Image: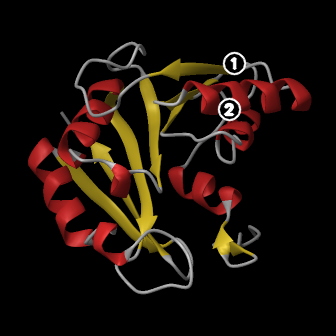
Amino acid sequence: MATKIPATRGGLISADFILAKAGMHEGMKVADLGCGAIGYFVIPAAKIVGPKGIVYGVDIQKSALDGVKSKARMEGVNNIETVWSNLEIYGATKIPAGSLDVALIITTLHQAKNRGEMMREAMRLLKVGGMLEIVDWKKISTPFGPDISLRLDQEEVKKIAQSLGFKLVEEFEAGQYHFGLKFKREV
């Protein structure tokens, strides 16, 4: 019997839960689009995909990428590549098109001015059959996090994804304050 992984750890998003939802396994190519500086998803993802896989940590802030590199070195993880990119510019991300098995956009989409372009860039990077997992803040008042006016309506995210050709595979609770959506690239 499989162990159930909790959606939250201390009230915040559990990396183990999110990565399990993405269906990652050894040998995959994965990108955390908007990875941030601490490698919260990048490091555990790299451990899951193992030495035959690769995880790209992508961010617009070079200092964030430096943080991921440093943490990876400290943890002895060697299958991470950092990529500096503006994810809102189609074609800007220096990862081969159609090469990813999984793309993660975790608590990043609400920051984008052009969410559709960010999702379009994710689609460009995914292979046919690849999975896009989006986790972001629920459009509810919370004691911390971004202003409610910046938060996303899940229906809006689904409409954008479906207009790009993604198929919704699963909706899930990613924790008390976050929603999760999993899409598949079909074309």
Tell me the kind of residue under disc 2.
Val
Say few, some or many: other residues with alpha carbon within 10 Å of mark 2 (under 14 / 14 to 19 / 20 or more): some
Q: Position of residue 161 (x, y in %)?
A: 20, 51
For the N terminus, give its image quadrant. bottom right
Tell me the kind of residue under disc 1.
Lys
Q: Position of residue 85 (x, y in %)?
A: 41, 23
Number of disc labels:
2
User: Residue 49 bears which disc, if any?
Assistant: 2
User: Residue 52 bears which disc, if any?
Assistant: 1
For marks 1 and 2, give the CA distance: 7 Å
Residue at screen point 39% across, 43% down: 131
Q: Nearer the viewer, residue 25 or 158?
A: 158
Circles 1 and 2: CB distance less than 8 Å? Answer: yes
Residue at screen point 39% across, 12% down: 96
Residue at screen point 50% across, 32% down: 59
Please say if 138 is above or below 57: below
User: Residue 19 bears which disc, if any?
Assistant: none
Please say if 2 is above or below 119: below
Please say if 19 is above or below 52: below
Of helix, strand and loop, which one carries label 2?
helix
Residue at screen point 21% across, 62% down: 158
Q: Position of residue 33 (x, y in %)?
A: 46, 37
Image check: 51 left or right of 82? Answer: right
Say few, some or many: other residues with alpha carbon within 10 Å of mark 1 (under 14 / 14 to 19 / 20 or more): few
Quadrant in the picture for residue 144: bottom right
Of helix, strand and loop, which one carries label 1?
loop
Image check: 16 left or right of 102? Answer: right
